Structure formats: structure tokens, C-alpha cells
Amino acid sequence: MDKTSSTITVVKIGGHVIDDEAALNEFLKKFALIPGLKVLVHGGGKVATTKAKQLGIPQTMIEGRRVTDVETLKIIVEVYRALNQKIVAILQSLGVSATGVSGTDSETICSRKRSIIPIDYGFVGDIESVSLARFEKLIDEGFIPVVAPLTQDVNSQVLNTNADSIATAVAVALSKKYKTSLFYVFEKKGVLLDVSDESSYIPELNFNLYQQLRAEKKIFEGMIPKLDNSFLSIRSGVSEVLIGKVGEAGTRIVYE
């Protein structure tokens, strides 16, 4: 089979979709019905924040990115691995041949610890490489990879890695072999000018408008990593990027 003519959908979930049991189950039913080849990448930051609060461990967020100290890293690893197992189990109950994947498995996703300049984010990883061969093998064997946002560096240090960045890196790697679509799924209709008003949704967002809205502080901080990664994906060979709810048009990301 000429894989360059095959299509694959990379879906990233986070936010309320992960936090709410009913919302997660409903999403996974819809994900199971997506035709063709697919990969699921999940976050879980809000779950980790809740867990940290219960344990009295303060959390710091800068432009939607978490500062990860030693104690926070322990929570992140525990929460993400448990979520990954839960999602895989639900998908399997829906007849989907899902398998859990982490960047720490067989050097699937390698990263380096982020520089402490200008901000020390602690044990946070910046992705250096994705093993296309590893994903191809799983896909060829009929599996749907479910990816947890953990990576490791050359010293086998586990690093907390932004799930939007993971989704982008995986989608870009897969675009070398497949026509790839990337869909960031969360609880909103799409990118909003006013986070509390769904009617302020933007159907299409290009890079110049994004830069303008960001400078005017009209983009919610938590959306910045998602949008930065969306534009990186489009520039790097991903055919289509959408942000929004499953079953709705969402915000289409275009570079020009």
C-alpha cells in the first residue's frame, strides 16, 4: 500500500472532556466511530492540578504552561499513566484495538529538559524526535495508539511535556507517510474572542490575525500553546488543523 495516499487523524483531548466522566465517555464513543487510521493524544493537566491541590502542592502556570518541580512531576506521572490506562480500557470496551503509548516507551518520543532561561519550568521537556517507525508498527498491526504526554531525555529522565506539543510532533512525523489531519478537541465551539461567549467563535484563524489578537490580549492564555502548535503543524506538513468540539465545524487554522 502506498501510505502517502492514506489518511490518518490525530485527535488531542483535554480540558473538560478529560475532567468529566460523562463527557469523556461520550467523546470516546464518537472517537471510536471516526473512520480510518487514527491516533489519540490526551492531556490531563486539570486532573493533575486538582490532585496537587488535594496534596497541598502549589502549582504555577505561565501562559498555559506548567512549572514542574520534583513533587509535581510525581503527580503528573501518576495521573497521566492512570488516565492512559482508563482511556485504553474504555476504548477496548467499545471494540477499538487501543494500546497505551508514552514518550518514555522504547524512545518513542525523545526530548530535552527545557532551558532555565528565560524561565525555569523545571522538569519540562521540549520534543526533539518522534519515532515514526514505532507508530507505523503499531498502526500496521491494527492498533490505535493512545498517547500520554510524558517524554524522556538522553539520561532517561522523565519529563512533563505539553500534550498539544505531543500531538503536533506526532502529527508532523506521521505527515511524512500519511495525509494527516490534526484535531484539538475541547469543550468550546472553537477559538473564542470572549471565553465566556460561544457566539464570539472564530470560524477561521490565520497567523497574522492570531498575532494581532495575542498582542491585544484577546486570546485566553490557556489557548496559546494550542495555537502555537496549530500553526507549527500547518507549516510542517500537516494537511488540516481544527480546534473545537467533535461533530462541529470548529476553528480552521490556516497559515496565510
Image: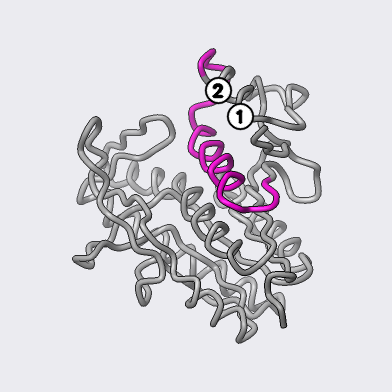
Is label 2 in a helix, a strand or a loop?
Answer: helix
Q: Residues within 10 Å of mark 1 (few under 14, many from 20)?
A: some
Q: Residue at x 30, y 48 (%)?
A: 124
Dot 1 amino acid type: Phe
Q: Which quarter of the image is occupied by the N terminus?
A: bottom right
Is label 1 in a helix, a strand or a loop?
Answer: helix
Instruction: Mark 2 and mark 1 in contact? Answer it, CB < 8 Å.
Output: yes
Q: Which residue is more in the foreground, 210 or 224?
A: 210
Q: Quadrant of residue 115?
A: top left
x and y percentages locating residue 240 in the rendered image: 70, 49
- Labelled disc at residue 189: none
Residue 225 vs 144, above or below: the answer is above
x and y percentages locating residue 224 in the rendered image: 50, 32
Q: Which residues are magenta?
A: 215-241
Q: Which quarter of the image is occupied by the C terminus?
A: top right
Q: Quadrant of residue 60?
A: top left
- For this view, does 198 lie left or right of residue 89? right
Dot 2 amino acid type: Gln
- For this view, does 252 lie left or right of residue 174? right
Residue 136 inside the magenta-drawn segment: no
Residue 155 vs 187, above or below: the answer is below
Residue furthest top as drawn = 216
Residue labelled with disc 1? 207
- Labelled disc at residue 211: 2
